[in-house]
Amino acid sequence: MFVVKDNSINKADVLYLERKSIELATDCSQYGVLNEKPGNEISLSNYQQDIMDEFFDDVRLLASFIGCPIFEKQEKAKMKGGDNLFHITVRECNAHGIFNETDHSMRILKGSLLPQSTVPSYRDGEKRNAIIAAMSKPTKNSFWELQRDYVLASPSTAASYCSGRSCNGWLHWINDAGQSLDELYRSE
């Protein structure tokens, strides 16, 4: 939540900022956006739009500064000696992800196929299913196909979301050379 020190922002301005926030957060895919609608289309004067865009730039900066980079695109960091693309096939999922060396997050890529079901012992199953369903379309063979990239804070959380069960992502995310994240980043 962000506020202004005076009454300089009106309802139309807020609706403009809301739509802009939803669009950018969805495009950046740092977090799941569960809005069913993209926000109301609002027409502002060019002058007022410039003011709101400047305010939004401040919001982006402050959000990143406090550790919530919801409006920042994650750069595809290069891994030592080559590509940073990894795959996981636990429980017949067919998911692909990009590992970020800086913060150890994992970007699950658009087009990944994830099982619609979870194992009964998976404690975050309901949360996982709601998030995955919101950004996927079902396939004929009981899988979800991601419609956009989705970033998770760790390889293990990403592996669990992909497979629908608890999973050690450091062991199960494998690159094209057959090496796990653990082999590449923890065994140095």
Image (cartoon, rainbow, N blue to C red):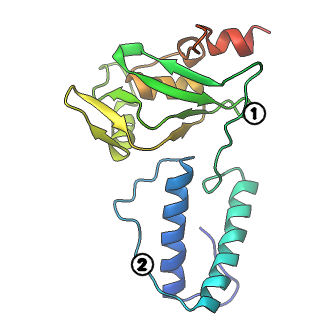
Q: Are marks 1 and 2 in contact (CB under 8 Å)?
A: no
Viewed as shown, does residue 123 lie left or right of 67?
A: left
Q: Residue at x 65, y 25 (%)?
A: 84
How crowded is the residue under tag 2: few (<14 C-alpha within 10 Å), some, or many (20+)? Answer: few
Q: Amino acid at mark 1?
A: Thr
Identify the residue position indicated by label 1 in the image: 102
> Is residue 163 visible in the rendered structure shown here?
yes
Q: Nearer the viewer, residue 4 or 132?
A: 132
Q: Residue at x 55, y 39 (%)?
A: 151
Q: Where is 186 relative to 65, above or below?
A: above
Identify the residue position indicated by label 2 in the image: 41
Q: CA distance from mark 1 to mark 2?
A: 37 Å
In which quarter of the view is residue 187 placed?
A: top right
How crowded is the residue under tag 1: few (<14 C-alpha within 10 Å), some, or many (20+)? Answer: few
Q: Horizontal and vertical percent for residue 152?
A: 55, 36
In which quarter of the view is residue 125 placed?
A: top left
Marker count (numbered)? 2
Q: Amino acid at mark 2?
A: Glu
